Image (cartoon, rainbow, N blue to C red):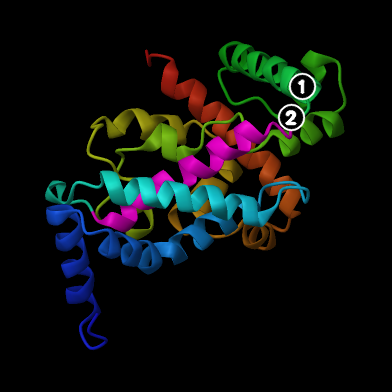
Amino acid sequence: MDPAHPEEGVERLWRSYKESGDRDARERLIVQYAPLVKYVAGRVRAGLPPQVDQADLISDGIIGLMDAIDKFERQRGLQFQTYAVRRIRGAIIDGLRRSDWVPRSVRDKFREIEAVQVTLERRLGRTPEDGDVAAELSISVAELRSVYGKISYTHVASIDEMGAGYENSSDQGMSFLADHDTDDPPEFLRALHELPERDRVIVALYYWERFTLAQIGQVLGISESRVSQLHTRAMLSLRHHMTVPVG
């Protein structure tokens, strides 16, 4: 690869692999884009308990990267990084789900919380606060937030899964969420608008600006674990609004 013209070198690797199946070119593409795996794994790891091994996330992410390289269709005009980030994140989250590190009791409680949140949203006409959900379940707010923290990234659909296709060409921070398979941005934007202001800020900083959970906590003056809890709550609400017809 020519150090003076790295883009041309990468382009040659893509042509070599896609046109002739050159395995050496594939290996070099994996090395070229490996930093994406570390980046995505770091972002996912920020919202997980300490017992989750970063090395495991990276291993799953590499599988996602290889899958992305194999399946990427250059003629569609989408940047590879945009496509790969979603594949890598999906592979990491699939690995977390397979590892089954969340106890069944927590998973069952989360399903109960999810059902109650949907019911309260319909009844109240707004995203319920933690106190609303906790009171409905007859548990403490601390217990509710503990479940949110334990379950994040394993049972809550990420914004990548729900918001794929909502590309804002004027915002490069959002571009990695883009996919040309979906074309109904208003639905996603309506769902986002329904969130409480602080939840919207967390979504914007995390997905648009690519802040870590710790950085968001510093901005908002709250702990990293609280940001993780609010992120989980926001994802629950977004998923509900994305699956319930408007009007």
Quadrant housing residue 125 = top right
Mark found first going from the N terminus, 2 or 1: 1
Give the SS element for disc 2: helix
Q: Is residue 175 visible?
A: no
Is 87 displayed left or right of 122 in the figure?
left
Is 81 displayed left or right of 238 in the figure?
left
Place of residue 227 in the rendered image (x, y in percent of width and height, measured from the top left): 68, 48
User: Which residue, given by chain and number where applicable, does mark 2 sit on?
Assistant: 130
Place of residue 99 in the rendered image (x, y in percent of width and height, measured from the top left): 66, 35
189 vs 225: above or below: above
Give the SS element for disc 1: helix
Quick check: is 90 in the magenta stretch?
A: yes
Is 51 displayed left or right of 115 in the figure?
right
User: Which residue, given by chain and number where applicable, does mark 1 sit on?
Assistant: 104
Q: Which residues are magenta?
A: 79-102
Of 161 and 12, the residue lying toward us? 12
Q: Which of the image's four quarters has the N terminus?
A: bottom left
Q: Which of the image's four quarters has the C terminus?
A: top left
Prevailing SS of the magenta stretch: helix
Number of numbered markers: 2
Q: Identify the residue shown where x is 60% and y is 26%.
A: 127
Place of residue 120 in the rendered image (x, y in percent of width and height, measured from the top left): 64, 15
109 vs 80: above or below: above
Q: Identify the residue shown where x is 53% and y is 52%.
A: 206
Q: Nearer the viewer, mark 2 or mark 1?
A: 1
Q: Is residue 87 visible?
A: yes
Q: Which mark is residue 211?
A: none
Is 62 displayed left or right of 147 in the figure?
left
How far apart marks 2 and 1 lie (CA) works out to 22 Å
- Check disc 1 and give the amino acid type: Arg
